[in-house]
Amino acid sequence: MGFIGSVWSLKVMAFSSPRASSLLLGHGRCARFLCSSSSSFPDHISFIKEVAVTRPPQHLSQLLKILNTRGESILSPGAKQGLIPLVIPLAKSSSGAITALLRWPTAPAGMEMPVVEVRKHGVWFLAKNVDQFIHRILVEEEANSRQKGSDELFHAASDAGKKFYQKGDFSKSKITDLDVYLLRKVGLFPDVLERKVIQHFEKGDHVSALVTGEFYARKEHFPGFARPFVFNAEVLLKVGRNPEAKDAARGALKSPWWTLGCNYHEVACIAEWEDEQIEYITEKLTEEGKQEDLNKGKPPVQITLDEAAFLLDLASVEGTWEDSLEQIAECYKKAGLHDIARFVQYRD
């Protein structure tokens, strides 16, 4: 079964997220992951191995040092209270923004954990992996630094930074637009692509705005994330292509709602669905709805995984993650994903 499904029956396998922790861990073990200073960076590595049960990013320690150096507070990886249960917190900025890793529960082997910003209704994609995020931070540091010779972040990145970016490369490239450099030399980022579309509109170039919006929404660019389709719907709406905007918004709502980058109702309004989809998945969660899927030949494991995905979707509407935490974990247990269940339940 493919990672990214385009129908409701594939939502959980494609998108539901981490590997959790439904076992009641001993108090001593919980304490091992309490991180309050830069000296505790190794605890994130241990947490990812033992609780998230996946491979830690090679340069995670360097990223944590970078975030700490630029003034962010390092968080315990188990400080997940009130957050979508599929994330591993890394750091919190002075504005309150939380940077984290996203642990997809059924990601293909070898797929790296994306870096995300945690928001009330879900997550915002920051980078496809830790290495790409470090690369972007270093480029932006050089481009935006007003103090010549400011090397703090480069020192924090250590040898890892040199693997991705040599200081001075931005200036040597002769590319004056930072966003253009990022797209050409570093990778694709939602905020950068959205800025490019807005700039096209400001110049009155609707054709370029539409082309960029469609490029942004190609499935292969941000697999699993609905935000590109939401933004493309907004672009189409802006130029008066309402039927296409409606279709794009409906397509976005087939992906996890916690990846929309905004509240569900904003997208449902464009899709002209109001609460129909909430009612639809609420019905799917009933015993009658599950029996109907069984009668159609859907495998019981898939029905259980769909249930977890639907619960996450409903929780994202108001950001009430804690209310359905136990139900979500139980679904993963029933599906045989006990490590994911433990991860979902884990709290410091």
Image (cartoon, rainbow, N blue to C red):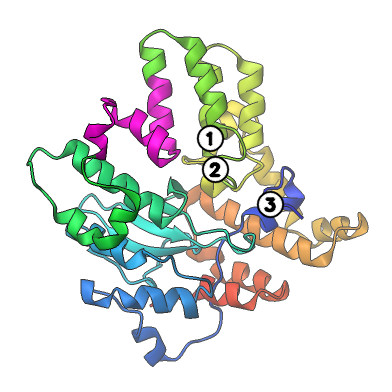
Amino acid type indicated by mark 1: Pro
Look at the magenta stretch and give its main secondary structure: helix
Q: Does residue 71 appear in the picture of this structure?
A: no
Front tag of 3 and 1: 1
Q: Is 195 inside the magenta-drawn segment? A: yes
Residue that numbered label 3 is attached to? 11
Identify which residue, 347 or 54, lies in the foreground: 54
Q: Residue at x 20, y 54 (%)?
A: 154
Q: Does residue 338 appear in the picture of this structure?
A: yes
Secondary element under disc 1, as helix, strand or loop, is helix
Amino acid type indicated by mark 2: Phe
Residue that numbered label 2 is attached to? 222
Q: Residue at x 56, y 11 (%)?
A: 240
Instruction: Rate crowding at label 2 as few (under 14), some (14 to 19) or many (20 or more) other CA atoms within 10 Å.
Output: some
Q: Is 232 inside the magenta-drawn segment? A: no
- Measure how far apart labels 2 and 1 are at the Cα level: 8 Å
**60 relative to 236, above or below:** below
Q: Earlier in the sequence, mark 3 or mark 1?
A: 3
Identify which residue, 168 or 134, lies in the foreground: 168
Q: Residue at x 67, y 26 (%)?
A: 247
**63 relative to 331, above or below:** above
Residue 80 at what x, y percent from top left?
Answer: 40, 67
Residue extent of the magenta highlight: 169-198
Front tag of 3 and 2: 2
Amino acid type indicated by mark 3: Lys
**191 relative to 105, above or below:** above
Residue that numbered label 1 is attached to? 228
Identify which residue, 22 or 103, lies in the foreground: 103
- Measure how far apart labels 3 and 1 are at the Cα level: 17 Å
Q: Which mark is residue 42?
A: none
Instruction: Rate crowding at label 1 as few (under 14), some (14 to 19) or many (20 or more) other CA atoms within 10 Å.
Output: many
Q: Earlier in the sequence, mark 2 or mark 1?
A: 2
